[in-house]
Image (cartoon, grey):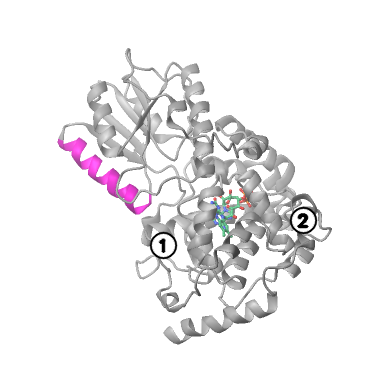
């Protein structure tokens, strides 16, 4: 009886333990992807994410065909769809790699129980994070709330397992279960086609992801420590969408980095880069223990913050990069064009929204969710709450980024602003930086009193 591999955030053949388990079972393998926009609590993908997903699935299908298999695409509530495919394929086993969001875990748990009751073998694996959230605990047995001790605890654990090699052959079933057409899913924008900048910037897919990792280690890691905060330097890995979609496994990134010649010569930058992967782990740790991270303040006393009535024109000016604050406008335009923004600029644009425009962090999180190709259910709300001051190990609320000083420090030659928003300096600033900062600090008094 065939085995089913249900792929989710792990669109890859290499280091895919669920796929490996299916192949090792020595029966035909059905590789399934389900577009689930219906199960309770599942967050619909944003536009840029849908674009990436389309291309990544197309790439994966080609790679599967080269190995004797194909990708089966289905749409609908995942638990029902997977059961349908089990019936269609007369499958005897289902394998997947684990997910850590609340609604996703509920789907997986229910499905696992139902399939086992029906006599179908089910097994799940760790593949998307290096340290599964429940394995890292404080002395008191709870979740970590601060990054540094969290990451120390991770480093004291057994090192992440070695990545699994890519299978050369994947024997498909004699007759594959019916599949949707990828083009029929409508994941790509039509009118207007806003994806030109995405096409120019990115090549989704597993091989491109691995190439980028190698190039990063060879060419950029040495300068990572020194220049990672400079948006024009181009020394960060740009691996975030690849990790988000699982085209690259964090185990592969970890081991290739540790083993690389560059890491031998540049131990400091390598440790720094690995600790950024640590922030990704910490974001998932936080989401696992606090599933409402995208909608609720992690620090409850922030519920006392009285957001003023939303000014839609301010939100739009921010989204469109027309605030008259050059570094903010450059970042927001880079985001709109490429589906990406440099980390330093993400912090500055987010801080400006929350602490100068006094707009609720959730509005910003939603915009990033819709426009980022790496929009991540953990990292996005985690970092928004970090900037807003309401999150785990967050920047204190009263530390307000000054976007002018940030530009002087991290875009010294003005090349990032010149590339993305050369006209911004001529716009009338939407708000006075000093006065709006003070208004934010005054509003924060209510949170302090709520302690
Ligand atoms: P590198 O510097 O090369 O870092 C390597 C990897 O570490 C990244 O690919 C990423 O997977 C991880 N990483 C680095 N920094 C962080 C961080 N602060 N939190 C979590 N993981 C991190 N990252 C996302 O992947 N998805 C998001 O939706 C997202 N939203 C963000 C929203 C805001 C407001 C802010 C301030 C940051 C956000 N980040 C998000 C984190 C960070 O900006 C990006 O991961 C990073 O810019 C990606 O570029 P890179 O791959 O070149 O990073």
In the rendered view, would you say 216 is above or below 384? above
Disc ID at residue 13:
none
- Residue 79, by quadrant, is top left
How crowded is the residue under tag 1: few (<14 C-alpha within 10 Å), some, or many (20+)? few
Element under disc 1? loop
Q: State whether label 2 is within 8 Å of ligand 1.
A: no
Where does residue 2 sit, x and y in percent of width and height?
28, 21
Where does residue 196 sit, x and y in percent of width and height?
64, 36
Residue 110 falls within the magenta-colored stretch: yes
- Res 451 visible: no
Residue 320 falls within the magenta-colored stretch: no
Element under disc 2? helix
Disc ID at residue 295:
1
- Left or right of 46 on screen, residue 296: left
Of mark 2 and mark 1, the one earlier in the sequence is: 1
- Res 26 visible: yes
- Left or right of 409 on screen, residue 168: left
Q: How would you classify the magenta stretch by its main secondary structure?
A: helix
The Cα–Cα distance between marks 2 and 1, rounded to whole angstroms, is 32 Å
Residue found farthest to the right? 413
Where does residue 80 sit, x and y in percent of width and height?
25, 36
Quadrant for the N terminus, please. top left
- Left or right of 76 on screen, residue 357: right
- Left or right of 404 on screen, residue 294: left
Task: Tell me the magenta residue range.
Answer: 100-117
Disc 2 target residue: 417
């Amino acid at each position: 009886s065939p085995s089913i591999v249900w792929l989710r955030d792990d669109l890859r053949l290499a280091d895919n333990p669920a796929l490996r388990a299916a192949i090792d079972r020595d029966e035909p393998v059905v590789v399934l992807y389900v577009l689930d926009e219906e199960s309770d609590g599942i967050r619909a993908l944003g536009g840029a994410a849908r674009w990436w997903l389309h291309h990544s699935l197309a790439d994966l299908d080609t790679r599967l065909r080269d190995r004797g298999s194909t990708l089966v695409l289905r749409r609908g509530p995942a638990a029902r769809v997977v059961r349908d495919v089990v019936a269609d394929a007369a499958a005897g086993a289902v394998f997947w790699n684990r997910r850590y969001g609340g609604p996703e875990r509920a789907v997986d748990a229910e499905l696992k129980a139902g399939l086992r009751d029906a006599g179908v073998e089910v097994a799940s694996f760790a593949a998307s994070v290096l340290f599964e959230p429940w394995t890292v605990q404080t002395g008191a047995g709870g979740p970590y709330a601060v990054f540094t001790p969290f990451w120390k605890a991770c480093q004291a654990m057994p090192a992440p397992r070695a990545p699994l090699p890519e299978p050369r052959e994947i024997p498909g079933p004699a007759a594959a279960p019916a599949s949707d057409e990828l083009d029929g899913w409508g994941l790509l924008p039509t009118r207007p086609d806003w994806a030109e900048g995405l096409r120019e910037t990115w090549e989704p897919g597993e091989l491109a992801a691995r190439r980028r990792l190698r190039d990063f280690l060879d060419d950029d890691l040495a300068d990572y420590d020194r220049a990672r905060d400079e948006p024009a330097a181009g020394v960060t890995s740009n691996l975030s969408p690849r990790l988000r979609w699982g085209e690259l496994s964090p185990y592969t990134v970890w081991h290739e980095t540790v083993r690389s010649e560059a890491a031998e010569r540049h131990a400091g930058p390598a440790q720094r880069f690995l600790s950024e992967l640590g922030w990704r782990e910490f974001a998932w740790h936080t989401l696992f223990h606090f599933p409402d991270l995208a909608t609720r303040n992690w620090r409850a006393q922030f519920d006392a913050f009285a957001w003023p009535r939303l000014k839609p024109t301010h939100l739009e000016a921010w989204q469109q990069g027309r605030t008259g604050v050059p570094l903010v406008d450059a970042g927001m335009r880079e985001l709109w064009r490429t589906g990406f923004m440099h980390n330093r600029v993400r912090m500055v644009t987010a801080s400006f929204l929350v602490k100068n425009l006094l707009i609720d962090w959730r509005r910003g999180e939603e915009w990033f969710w819709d426009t980022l190709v790496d929009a991540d259910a953990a990292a996005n709300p985690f970092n928004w709450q970090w900037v807003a001051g309401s999150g785990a190990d967050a920047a204190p609320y009263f530390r307000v980024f000054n976007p002018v000083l940030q530009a002087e420090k991290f875009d010294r030659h003005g090349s990032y602003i010149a590339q993305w928003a050369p006209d911004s300096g001529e716009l009338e600033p939407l708000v006075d930086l000093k006065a709006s900062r003070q208004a934010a600090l005054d509003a924060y008094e209510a949170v302090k009193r709520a302690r």
